[in-house]
């Protein structure tokens, strides 16, 4: 048995040999593997070398075209019903509209079964989002069944989940991918069977009927950075706090901010990772204050730790400089209570409503945009009251667009 | 600061020298490490020893130091407590959830309630380990899953209340306007742990970790002692939760990874996993060293991403050096061990 | 070096000879497979009552498929735990393995990639083993430190998914023979090799001996250091296999492929669930596979019933503790008898 399978089990093949020879093998192959990717023969093939660059991108994580397009979209006027940003779309013509008559349910959408493969609920943003999505489903009587499978952050499990759901009798499949690249094969497989709607993070295939997302990370990072550029004098000291390295969706936010700071001549004195841990963030900011004397602005790639940064200034007895956050309730509360000079770009949780609406449209045979780009609100001094809602819990997200949904505010933990 | 390892059960002329050597052997490297790190901090940041900054450093280290003291009790009795990180998260979230329902609850009551809950978690850990004979690694791993799951299941993913200033003051504020409460908490926990380890309890705890069966034969009520160690660890974790909640407010991941940090701190302090050896003060010094290392890496501006790599190397190297001992160092230690007896406890 | 040889009554218990294949219901290996069967049956009933279908082919495929990655890691973890050690670096090694695999495949051949990943794994395993035996750093700390080192390297070098796995290699992750995923054969093959090594070779006997009582093993001529190093290398190679499988399934390398799934603690849980003593010396690969299957079936039932993911963790925690408490029953009986005997002795003396 072992002989016949020898070729098909790479893991086991060298098991017995490997142990004694491990050191040698390791040394020899480690040396060679690191030099494998950018070999000359690859350079002849433009496609391959481009891909290799994609993979090897390190700090140079930047795409000028995407960046330009996102900044342009922030200025565009959305199409769609006023006051319902989750149904609006920005520049839908760019990706073209999709004819969905082939997916239309015979006899109308009554009794539709929607299925959702969720990456997980491992942070408050996703928890608020899922609640919002479930409430959206609840207000559509025509949806007979809504099945959610939670991958708990495991790509491998999400692939199985998608396979399982596409094998069931779902009428449409909604996917919120855990990882951009890795779910592509599974989504492609599902596309062959049922209409697929992807939202939040994308996948590297256009087989989905529609891909729903807000404008994106460059716009987010730039909005926060531009605010600091306006508020802080040239040469001012900026502390940038990031969640963690290696997350592509967060890298775009930082690269946009980096450009803005450089252009404006602001001095970024610290770029640190907080792991989303407020105590770590507070320590980092305290150290920065001690070290640089005065900090003139704080930039964040997401809101989870902005209150901790605010408190670090308070505890050090310093004035709180202009600071950026997110539409998380605790930051909005601090903004209000302490009269901060602040801005809060949102990566809106209302986008969790849109996939359900899109699914019903598709099953009714109505056309949807191939790329459904939602507006990406920015909370400022002027529109603060639209997003700050008294009585919501600290980890709630203001741009949930959930105020008109059944069960609000109780189901979101508010009172 | 003195090392406090009380002699283990076996007594005799040889064991006095042995105990002393062991004391220095397990305790000394961490003080050297701490001294080196503190010196490096002084060079990196001349303002570090301003009273304010230094107190702030201790305040920041407080939760980890307290966790390390609790973890020490469990480790030295021959176990592990992997649930402490989950206790911290659960404590912070439960506190906020509680304040969501009773916004006017007095902070002392909530704090006491959390400490009691931590003690109960420790009690359950201890009973499962000693009565059902489940290895503590598994007991506390299961408890970690249960606590994390239960607290978020209960709160629907995130807590609904806001922690009031009165509750947060303990972890955030200062007594008399300059001395952080957290520093007082560290001193109190340190004194208590030191006293406990000198008392009968400490002796029996070490004896249990050293050789459970021999301890039982000598009349130690092993299950009770070990359970008590878990109770202490659970309570310490709850206290750390109160401090973390005070320091940085509500967070759904307040205690993530703290269990590994606490165990690392204890091991840095020269405490042997498996039990029976090591001093609680050294364990707490290990926690300070770890925090000093974090601060140093932060100040040095090591590329954020590489920080973990440096940390991994240093921890392995420190523990490795402590375990094998530099040949030169151990020779030095042997030669000095007798004349410096009086000195070592000063 | 022995990570968790702490619970004296357990570790001091007499060890069964490896390879003695007696089947008893009280044997954890038999117990865990029975438990998996029982959970399947209960799941079937509950899901049917709930109005779903459990005994479907696609569900079985899913259960098997979801067992592969954890299974590969847990089988490797069994080897180190048997030897009285532990490996907490597996999660980051998986992440790095998928990245190396996918990047190498993008620019080179599949064979090179497989060799590169296995070489990387062997090197990490060797380093773990050397730190544990040579520097005498406790396995818990040594492998935790290694995890940090790998983490820093990954975070410093990758900003997200990287590389590209050719379709031919993705077949490992997606193809099926009937309703059995091809990758299950990989798991079976790896498990079979490890079973043979642990039960039928001298190295295996040495692993059991080292895990059971390192001191005694050394006195009886076992080269315990070398054994521990081999165990770590074996474990890391299994992890490498898991990384290759995940790369084939994901189509790319992902920096969080191993960590978000918590393969480190989950694999230890599966091993212990399968009846391997955490202190070393008892248990084996067969039980581990049962433990993995049990966890996988549980997951599938939770999926079918749409159980809240947080509640899942609670159940998992309870199951793990309860299972190990059951395995400890014979020791409890023995401990009780000992206590009673001692009480009697005391009574006689008085």
Image: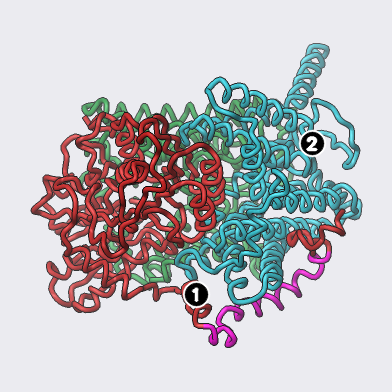
Residues packed near mark 1 inside 10 Å, few (<14), some (14 to 19) or many (20 plus) = some
Same chain letter for marks 1 and 2: no
Q: Which residue is mark 2?
A: C12
**Where residue A372 sits: x, y (%)?**
30, 55
Residue positioned 33% across, 58% down in the render: A371
Q: Based on the displayed image, in which of its 4 quarters is residue A302 positioned? A: bottom left
* Residue B236, above or below A273: above
> Dot 2 lies on which element?
loop
Q: Main secondary structure of the magenta part?
A: helix
What color was chain A assigned in the picture? Answer: red
Q: CA distance from mark 1 to mark 2?
A: 57 Å
Q: Based on the displayed image, in which of its 4 quarters is residue A267 positioned? A: bottom left
**Where residue C207 sits: x, y (%)?**
82, 50
Query: Does the magenta segment cover residue A30?
Result: yes
Chain with colour green in the figure: B
Magenta range is A17-45
> Which quadrant is the C terminus of chain A positioned in?
top left
Side of A198 relative to C145 (left or right): left
What color was chain C assigned in the picture? Answer: cyan
Q: Is residue A322 visible?
A: yes
> Dot 1 lies on which element?
helix
Query: Does the magenta segment cover residue A306?
Result: no
- Relative to the observer, which residue lies in front, C178 or B152? C178
């Amino acid at each position: 048995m072992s002989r016949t399978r020898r070729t098909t089990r790479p893991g086991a093949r060298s098991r017995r040999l490997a142990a004694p020879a491990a050191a040698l093998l390791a040394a020899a192959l480690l040396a060679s593997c690191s030099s494998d990717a950018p070999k000359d023969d690859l350079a002849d093939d433009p496609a391959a070398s481009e891909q290799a660059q994609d993979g090897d991108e390190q700090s140079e994580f930047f795409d000028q075209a995407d960046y330009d397009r996102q900044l342009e979209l922030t200025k565009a006027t959305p199409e769609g019903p006023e006051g319902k940003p989750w149904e609006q779309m920005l520049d839908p013509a760019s990706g073209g509209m999709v004819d969905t008559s082939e997916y239309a349910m015979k006899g109308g959408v009554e009794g539709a079964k929607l299925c959702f493969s969720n990456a997980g609920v491992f942070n408050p943003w996703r928890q608020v989002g899922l609640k919002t999505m479930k409430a959206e489903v609840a207000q559509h009587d025509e949806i007979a069944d809504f099945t959610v499978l939670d991958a708990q952050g495991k790509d491998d499990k999400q692939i199985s989940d998608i396979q399982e759901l596409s094998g069931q009798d779902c009428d449409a499949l909604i996917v919120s991918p855990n990882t951009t690249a890795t779910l592509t094969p599974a989504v492609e497989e599902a596309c062959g069977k049922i209409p697929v709607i992807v939202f939040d993070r994308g996948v590297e295939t256009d087989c989905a009927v529609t891909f729903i997302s807000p404008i994106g990370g460059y716009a987010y990072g730039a909005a926060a950075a531009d605010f600091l550029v306006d508020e802080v004098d040239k040469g001012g000291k900026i502390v940038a706090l990031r969640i963690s390295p290696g997350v592509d969706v967060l890298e775009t936010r930082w690269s946009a901010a980096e450009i803005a700071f450089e252009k404006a001549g602001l001095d970024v004195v610290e770029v640190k990772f907080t792991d989303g841990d407020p105590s770590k963030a507070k320590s980092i900011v305290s150290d920065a204050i001690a070290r640089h004397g005065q900090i003139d602005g704080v930039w964040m790639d997401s809101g989870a730790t902005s209150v901790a940064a605010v408190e670090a200034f308070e505890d050090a007895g310093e004035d709180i400089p202009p600071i950026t956050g997110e539409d998380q309730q605790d930051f909005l509360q601090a903004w209000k209570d302490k009269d901060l000079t602040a801005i809060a770009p949102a990566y809106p949780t209302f986008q969790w409503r849109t996939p359900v609406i899109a699914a019903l449209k598709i099953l009714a045979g109505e056309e949807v945009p191939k790329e459904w780009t939602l507006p990406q609100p920015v909370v400022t001094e002027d529109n603060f009251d639209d997003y700050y809602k008294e009585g919501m819990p600290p980890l709630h997200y203001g741009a949930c667009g959930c105020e008109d949904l059944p069960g609000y505010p109780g189901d979101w933990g508010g009172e | 600061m003195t090392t406090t390892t009380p002699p283990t059960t076996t007594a005799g002329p040889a064991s006095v020298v042995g105990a002393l050597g062991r004391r220095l052997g397990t305790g000394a490297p961490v003080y050297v490490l701490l001294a080196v790190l503190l010196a490096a901090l002084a060079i990196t940041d001349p303002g570090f020893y301003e009273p304010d900054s230094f107190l702030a450093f201790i305040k920041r280290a407080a939760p980890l130091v307290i966790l390390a003291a609790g973890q020490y009790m469990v480790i030295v009795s021959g176990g592990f407590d992997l649930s402490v990180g989950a206790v911290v998260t659960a404590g912070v979230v439960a506190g906020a959830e509680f304040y969501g329902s009773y916004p006017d609850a007095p902070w002392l009551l909530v704090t006491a309630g959390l400490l009691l809950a931590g003690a109960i978690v420790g009690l359950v850990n201890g009973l499962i380990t000693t009565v059902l004979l489940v290895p503590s690694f598994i007991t506390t791993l299961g408890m970690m899953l249960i606590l994390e799951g239960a607290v978020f299941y209960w709160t629907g993913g995130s807590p609904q209340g806001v922690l009031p200033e009165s509750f947060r003051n303990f972890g955030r504020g200062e007594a008399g306007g300059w001395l952080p409460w957290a520093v007082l908490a560290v001193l109190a926990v340190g004194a208590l742990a030191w006293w406990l380890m000198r008392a009968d309890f400490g002796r029996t705890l070490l004896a249990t970790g050293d050789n459970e069966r021999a301890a039982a034969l000598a009349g130690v009520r092993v299950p009770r002692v070990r359970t008590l160690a878990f109770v202490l660890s659970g309570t310490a974790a709850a206290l750390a939760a109160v401090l973390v909640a005070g320091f940085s407010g509500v967070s759904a991941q307040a205690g993530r990874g703290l269990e590994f940090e606490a165990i690392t701190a204890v091991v840095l302090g020269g405490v042997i996993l498996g039990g029976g050896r090591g001093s609680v003060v050294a364990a707490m010094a290990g926690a300070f060293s770890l925090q000093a290392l974090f601060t140093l890496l932060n100040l040095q501006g090591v590329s954020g991403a590489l920080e973990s790599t440096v940390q991994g190397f240093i921890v392995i190297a420190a523990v490795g050096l402590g375990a094998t001992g530099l040949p030169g160092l151990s020779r030095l230690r042997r030669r000095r061990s007798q004349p410096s007896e009086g000195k070592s406890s000063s | 070096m022995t990570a968790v040889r702490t619970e004296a009554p357990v570790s001091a218990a007499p060890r069964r000879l490896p390879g003695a294949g007696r089947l008893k219901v009280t044997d954890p290996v038999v117990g865990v497979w029975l438990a998996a069967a029982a959970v399947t049956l209960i799941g079937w009933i509950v899901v049917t009552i709930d109005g779903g279908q459990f005994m479907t082919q696609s569900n079985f495929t899913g259960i098997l498929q979801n067992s592969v990655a954890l299974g590969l890691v847990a089988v490797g973890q069994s080897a180190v735990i048997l030897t009285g050690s532990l490996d907490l670096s597996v999660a980051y090694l998986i992440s790095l393995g998928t990245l190396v695999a996918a990047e190498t495949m993008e620019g080179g051949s599949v064979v090179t990639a497989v060799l590169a990943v296995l070489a990387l794994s062997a090197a990490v395993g060797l380093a773990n083993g050397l730190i544990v035996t040579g520097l005498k750093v406790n396995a818990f700390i040594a492998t935790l430190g290694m995890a940090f080192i790998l983490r820093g390297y990954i975070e410093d070098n990758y900003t997200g998914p990287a590389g590209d796995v050719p379709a031919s290699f993705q077949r490992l992750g997606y193809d099926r023979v009937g309703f059995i995923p091809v990758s299950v054969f990989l798991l079976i093959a790896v498990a079979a090799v490890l079973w043979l090594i642990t039960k039928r070779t001298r190295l295996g006997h040495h692993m059991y001996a080292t895990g059971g009582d390192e001191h005694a093993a050394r006195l009886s001529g076992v080269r315990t250091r070398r054994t521990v190093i081999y165990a770590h290398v074996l474990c890391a190679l299994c992890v490498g296999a898991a990384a290759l499988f995940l790369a084939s399934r994901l189509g790319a390398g992902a920096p969080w492929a191993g960590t978000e799934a918590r393969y480190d603690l989950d694999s230890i849980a599966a091993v212990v669930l399968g009846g391997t003593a955490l202190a070393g010396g008892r248990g084996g690969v067969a039980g581990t596979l049962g433990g993995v299957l049990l966890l996988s079936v549980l997951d599938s039932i939770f999926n079918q019933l749409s159980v809240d993911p947080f509640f899942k963790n609670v159940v998992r925690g309870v199951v793990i503790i309860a299972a190990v408490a059951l395995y400890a029953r014979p020791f409890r009986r023995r401990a009780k008898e000992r206590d009673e005997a001692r009480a009697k002795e005391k009574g006689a003396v008085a």
